[in-house]
Image (spheres, helix red, strand yellow):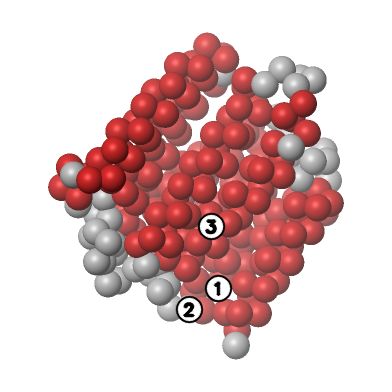
Amino acid sequence: MVPPILIALAAANAVYYLVAQCYRGPSLPKSVSKTMSTSLLAVAALALDAPPLLAVALALGAAGDLALSRDGETAFLTGLMAFALAHVAYIVLFVATGGADPGVLQTGWRMNAALGLLAFGGAMGRLLWPASGVLRWSVMGYLAIILTMGLAALATPPQALAIAPATALAGAALFILSDAVLSAELFLLPKRHPLRRVAPFVIWSSYWAAQYLLLRGFTP
């Protein structure tokens, strides 16, 4: 009964953050609810006897959540590093546990999806390079890592037995969506753009769903 309780508590924090905090400035309730939403998933991964690296990835996500709940360049770079390391952990999980194989990307819809992902990454890079200023190299490095994570998810064979490939792939896709909207909010949207009103809700809901689906994907 422990994992369901932990996941329910994580979901409760996530819902509270979505409806009451995601659009507000830094505060203790914002930092606590955001961090607990993912750190409880990390504890649930341990309770579910998941691959240890999954708990590490989720814990790194929680550290990134804490950093990004604060303002300032240092907090942003700390969060960026934490999430970059989390994606590296997910890449290793897709390869070592899911058996990701580049050959899977050579035919069918997966090849088209991989090409589309690379094209999307190239377009985002072209937009973010001038817009991210002194942070551009950090942003480009992160972009490369999350694209690699997406490709690793696509390269996981559908018949993989150690994970639930479709669930994990959905989680990876939502993670990319969340980060794309976040980067647009941070660097591309004008200050008074109407999409800024909805961006925090899209970012958080897709992000937390991604982490939950990745948890489920690696604990089938």
Q: Which residue is mark 2?
A: 48
53 w.r.t. 111: above or below: below
Q: Are dots 1 and 2 in contact, CB under 8 Å? A: yes
Residue at 49% x, 41% y: name it.
176
Residue at 37% x, 35% y: name it.
117
User: Does residue 131 appear to the left or right of 5 in the view shown?
Assistant: left
Which quadrant holds residue 71? top right
Which quadrant holds residue 49? bottom left
Q: Give the structural element (helix, strand or loop) at label 2.
A: loop
Q: Amino acid at mark 2?
A: Leu
203 w.r.t. 96: above or below: above
183 w.r.t. 28: above or below: above
Q: Residue furthest top?
A: 130
> Residue 150 location in percent, x, y?
38, 44
Placement of the C terminus among the 4 image quadrants: bottom left
Q: Are dots 1 and 3 in contact, CB under 8 Å? A: no
Give how far apart the Cα atoms at labels 3 and 2 are.
Answer: 15 Å
Placement of the N terminus among the 4 image quadrants: bottom right
Q: Which residue is mark 3?
A: 211
> Residue 65 location in percent, x, y?
64, 48
Classed neighbour count for the residue bearing mark 1: other residues with Cα under 10 Å, few (<14), some (14–19), many (≥20):
many
Give how far apart the Cα atoms at labels 1 and 3 are.
Answer: 12 Å
Mark 3 or mark 2, earlier in chain = 2
Q: Amino acid at mark 3?
A: Gln
Q: Which residue is mark 1?
A: 44
Q: Amino acid at mark 1?
A: Ala
